[in-house]
Structures are given as structure tokens and as C-alpha cells.
Image (cartoon, rainbow, N blue to C red):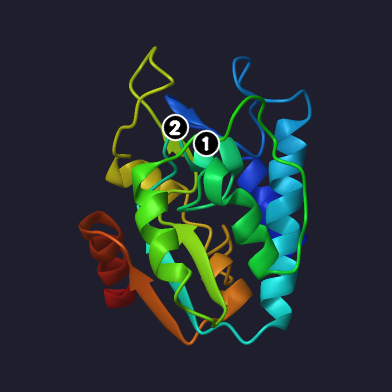
């Protein structure tokens, strides 16, 4: 699967009470072309990761409303948006309006990443922003069913997807939910 194919599949994911930052646009915080900016940045980053020797992939649970919903990047908020892209030699304008918004998990992750000088790819077991019904600026854990239906590590035909695209030496979960999902997948 190529980065372009992967991002195309990602753009097509739709779930109730989940914001897809690669397709959807937030009328409050996003620029007009925000979803195209986010999907373009991800595709460019994946292309760079494919050609790099990836040390590890760090996997979180899902995108948060103050982080990945805005940036389209796992474990990354507005404050760390340019830093994340620059690790891959990419420079892009942020897809949102207003001042950069910090997010707690992203702050912790990026404090660690600033001390590490090896290529690490960041991803989530659920690559969208799940939220409470009728409350899009909330965070909510995705259901196991939504996680299974969004698993882009495998396509509908069973061929390899996301994790295989970047081919890391190690996969590390950043929380209990992502760890449990990785363990379930590896047991199959």
C-alpha cells in the first residue's frame, strides 16, 4: 500500500460521533482547505517515513479535540505541529485559525521526543477524533467495533496497510487502550 492509497482510505472513514480531520472541516477552527492540508501533510510525512529507516512507531488511542483533530497528526497539537513536520523535513502552514492550542498528551510526548534523535512515527489505533454525541469539542474513547472497522493496517482484502507502510523496527503503545489493541491484533 502506498502513502497515497493509505491516505485515500483514511479520508473515506466515516463513523457517527467521530470527526475525520482528513475529510471533515470544523467551521469554528479550520481554514477552508484544512482537511486537504491535513491529508496532504500526512501523505507527505508517510512518503518520507517510507524512505527512512524508522526506529519505532509510537501508538496512541485516538485523536483529541485539542490535538490531532486540529493538526491531523497523532499525539501532536498546534504547539508542536511545525516541530513534528520538521522532523521529516517538511514545512507547511497549519490548517487552523487563531493561536496555537496546547494539548496535555502531546506536550508530554513531545517533551520525550525532543530528547530523541531517531526517526519515530506517531499513529493511533483509532485515527479519527471520537466525541460525545452533539458535543464535537469533547473526547470519548472509541468503541472496540469502531477501532476494528478503522484498522488500516489491513485493507478489506487482508493486504498490509498502515504499520506495514512505514515498517518500524518496534511498535510501542502510549496507553492501555492502544496496548490492548496491539496485543489483540498480534494474537491473531
Q: Is residue 5 above or below residue 58?
A: above
Residue 123 place in picture, x, y as percent? 48, 60
Q: Residue at x 60, y 59 (%)?
A: 84
Q: Which residue is mark 2?
A: 65
Q: Which residue is mark 1?
A: 69
> In which quadrant will I find the N terminus?
bottom right
Q: Is residue 167 visible?
A: yes
Residue 186 place in picture, x, y as percent? 32, 76
Residue 62 place in picture, x, y as percent? 40, 46
Residues at discs 2 and 1 in contact (Cβ within 8 Å): yes
Q: Is residue 1 visible?
A: no
Label at residue 58: none
Q: Is residue 155 above or below residue 41?
A: below
* Depth check, front residue: 156 or 97: 97
Residue 27 place in picture, x, y as percent? 63, 15
Q: Is residue 86 above or below residue 124?
A: below
Amino acid at each position: 500500500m502506498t502513502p497515497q492509497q493509505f491516505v485515500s482510505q483514511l479520508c473515506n472513514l466515516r463513523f457517527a460521533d467521530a470527526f475525520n480531520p482528513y475529510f471533515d472541516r470544523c467551521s469554528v477552527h479550520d481554514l477552508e482547505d484544512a482537511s486537504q492540508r491535513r491529508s496532504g501533510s500526512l501523505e507527505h510525512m508517510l512518503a518520507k517515513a517510507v524512505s527512512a529507516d524508522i526506529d519505532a512507531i509510537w501508538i496512541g488511542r485516538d485523536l483529541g479535540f485539542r490535538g490531532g483533530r486540529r493538526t491531523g497528526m497523532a499525539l501532536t497539537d498546534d504547539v508542536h505541529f511545525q516541530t513534528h513536520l520538521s522532523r521529516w523535513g517538511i514545512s507547511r502552514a497549519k490548517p487552523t485559525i487563531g493561536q496555537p492550542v496546547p494539548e496535555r498528551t502531546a506536550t508530554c510526548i513531545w517533551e520525550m521526543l525532543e530528547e530523541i534523535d531517531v526517526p519515530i512515527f506517531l499513529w493511533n489505533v483509532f485515527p479519527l477524533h471520537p466525541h460525545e454525541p452533539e458535543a464535537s469539542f469533547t473526547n470519548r474513547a472509541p468503541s472496540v467495533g469502531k477501532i476494528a472497522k478503522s484498522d488500516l493496517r489491513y485493507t478489506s482484502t487482508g493486504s498490509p496497510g498502515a504499520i506495514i507502510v512505514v515498517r518500524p523496527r518496534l511498535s510501542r503503545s502510549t496507553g492501555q487502550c492502544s496496548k490492548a489493541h496491539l496485543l489483540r491484533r498480534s494474537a491473531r
